[in-house]
Image: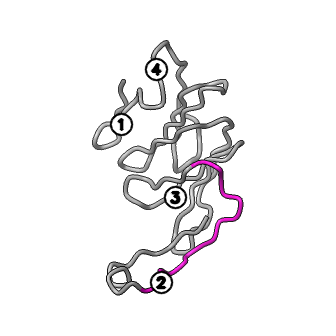
Amino acid sequence: MFVNYFSATSAQNKTDENTVAVLENASDKAASFSPMGTYLIIIKADKVVFYGGKNMRTIITLKISKVEEVTMSPCERYVLTYSPMGENVYTIWNFQMAEEIRSFTQTYGEDNITYKWSHDGQYIAK
């Protein structure tokens, strides 16, 4: 996986982008960015890795397996992981401390988009 720095000027001039980082064996799942674009979120088989900074280095790793979806709160202080094949289907994490705050079981009809963060990241609801 290549992480490139996007510049509107270089895009308009059709010049090459600047490669910031090459992440070897990152994941077979799609990568996503946090709401403010601070972190690149990569889901691996046994963990979720958050990359950041100018060189896209590992910032925080959440040790949780079988994750299919990660949703970060708008304030980037909390993370919700969705692991339908894991012990805890929904888990809320304190992102800065990499600590589990709470977990929820899954009821019939729920999926990876059941829970939504409030605009400020202080609440989660379904």
Tag 4 and tag 1, C-beta contact below 8 Å: no
Sequence order check, earlier mark of 2 and 4:
2
Q: Nearer the viewer, residue 46 or 109?
A: 109
Kind of residue at badge 3: Leu
Sequence order check, earlier mark of 1 and 2:
2
Sequence order check, earlier mark of 3 and 4:
3
- What residue is disc 1 on? 117
Q: Is residue 20 magenta?
A: yes
Q: CA distance from mark 3 to mark 1?
A: 19 Å
Q: Which residues are magenta?
A: 15-29
Q: Secondary structure at mark 4?
A: loop
Colour scheme shown: one colour
Q: Nearer the viewer, residue 64 or 1?
A: 1
Sequence order check, earlier mark of 2 and 3:
2
Pair 3/4: label in front = 4
Kind of residue at badge 1: Trp
- What residue is disc 4 on? 110
Q: Main secondary structure of the magenta part?
A: loop
Q: Residue at x 49, y 53 (%)?
A: 32
**Label 4 Cα crowd, 10 Å radius (few <14 / some 14-19 / many 20+):** few
Pair 2/4: label in front = 2
- What residue is disc 2 on? 16
Q: CA distance from mark 2 to mark 4?
A: 43 Å
The answer to whether residue 74 is above or below residue 114 is below
